[in-house]
């Protein structure tokens, strides 16, 4: 197996904690604690992506996401740590008063191009066109796709499994539950579970795409990692479980009943979930596993997203 080069960005290993909610104990992996401004799951991916950008002598970083994208914010800050300017292609519009991740992108000096929903569907083509314009000026833009979901990026969640193996006996664990947007986090885990021949399920709570699309994305990324780094393994597609129907209100929205669960959880545990990813994923985890007293067999991954809360005060406190 080959190992890609990385830079040091994340505060790892993150804790694996046993906590109690509604008198039921469960395991939670605190990847919200990978850093402060650089908190969340994206940082593990960016350790490998930024190293690759430096290797390719990038003059600028391009990436994309929603206007409250955790990945876009993490990329901006990570790139700035290495003196690289950033251009973001965001689904949304400029605001007179910015909040959350959008606010931080502006504070850290990212250049931003705003796209409507139909334009964002072609965001990869738009980024490539902008990259070609820079190349004509002898400038090299390094393009990072949505969520940092590249073969080198998802390697960050291959090593997540090796980290977890030092914290718990995974032969006693039935599944690991995480939110799935672009699918990279789940893909890295699935590749590692396949490589180490573990019987653990990777349970992806779908928050953005259709079940068919996110399943395909995860399997393709896991296979790309397998080929890129000579894992020489069979990706265990049967170990992937996609939980659908927990984001029917749309990626940018969240229902009042989900907010109620998030608030109750925060009051009981002192841990807060965001509206796009972890809040929806925990509702799924609670309904499917924790409510059935399976919390010590199924690990919940808190993948961060705290900054996405800001600007949602009326929804969370209403």
Image (spheres, grey):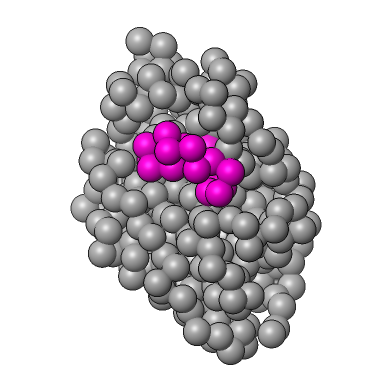
| Residue drawn 34% across the image and 65% down it | 215
Q: Position of residue 71 (x, y in %)?
A: 52, 49
In the image, 151 versus 194, the foreground residue is: 194
In the image, 244 versus 216, the foreground residue is: 244
Determine if the magenta segment contains residue 295.
Answer: yes
Q: Position of residue 177 (x, y in %)?
A: 49, 50
Q: Image check: 277 left or right of 7?
A: left
| Residue drawn 58% across the image and 33% down it | 25
Q: Quadrant of the N terminus?
A: bottom right
Query: As displayed, is residue 267 above or below residue 208?
Result: above
Query: As displayed, is residue 208 above or below residue 185?
Result: above
Q: Image check: 204 left or right of 44?
A: left
Determine if the magenta segment contains residue 140.
Answer: no
| Residue drawn 29% across the image and 41% down it | 247
Regarding residue 113, the answer to whether it shows in the image is: no
Which residue is situated farthest in the top direction here? 318
Query: As displayed, is residue 79 above or below residue 213?
Result: above
Regarding residue 13, the answer to whether it shows in the image is: yes
Q: Which residues are magenta?
A: 284-305
């Amino acid at each position: 197996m080959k190992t890609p080069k990385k830079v040091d960005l994340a505060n790892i290993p993150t804790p694996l904690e046993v906590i109690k909610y509604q008198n039921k104990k469960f395991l939670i992996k605190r990847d919200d604690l990978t850093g402060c401004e650089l908190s969340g799951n994206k940082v593990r991916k960016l350790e490998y992506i930024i190293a690759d950008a430096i290797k390719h002598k990038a003059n600028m970083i391009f990436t994309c996401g929603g206007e409250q994208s955790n990945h876009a914010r993490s990329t901006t800050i990570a790139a700035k740590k290495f003196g690289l300017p950033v251009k973001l292609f965001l689904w949304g519009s400029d605001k007179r008063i910015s909040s959350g991740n959008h606010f931080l992108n502006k504070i850290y000096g990212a250049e931003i191009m705003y796209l409507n929903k139909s334009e964002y569907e072609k965001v990869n083509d738009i980024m490539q066109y902008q990259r070609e314009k820079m190349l004509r000026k002898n400038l090299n833009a390094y393009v990072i796709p949505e969520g940092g979901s590249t073969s080198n990026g998802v390697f960050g969640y291959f090593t997540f499994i090796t980290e977890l193996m030092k914290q718990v006996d995974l032969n006693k664990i039935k599944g690991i539950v995480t939110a799935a947007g672009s699918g990279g986090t789940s893909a890295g885990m699935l590749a590692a579970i396949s490589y180490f021949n573990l019987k653990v399920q990777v349970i992806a709570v779908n928050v953005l795409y259709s079940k068919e699309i996110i399943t395909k994305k995860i399997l393709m990324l896991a296979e790309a990692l397998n080929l890129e780094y000579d894992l020489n393994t069979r990706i265990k597609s049967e170990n992937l479980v996609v939980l659908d129907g927990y984001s029917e209100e749309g990626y940018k929205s969240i229902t009042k009943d989900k907010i109620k669960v998030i608030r109750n959880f925060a009051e009981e545990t002192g841990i807060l979930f965001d509206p796009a990813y972890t809040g929806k994923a925990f509702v799924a985890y609670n309904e499917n596993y924790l409510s059935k007293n399976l919390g010590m067999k199924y690990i919940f991954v808190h993948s961060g997203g705290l900054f996405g809360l800001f600007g949602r005060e009326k929804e969370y406190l209403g």
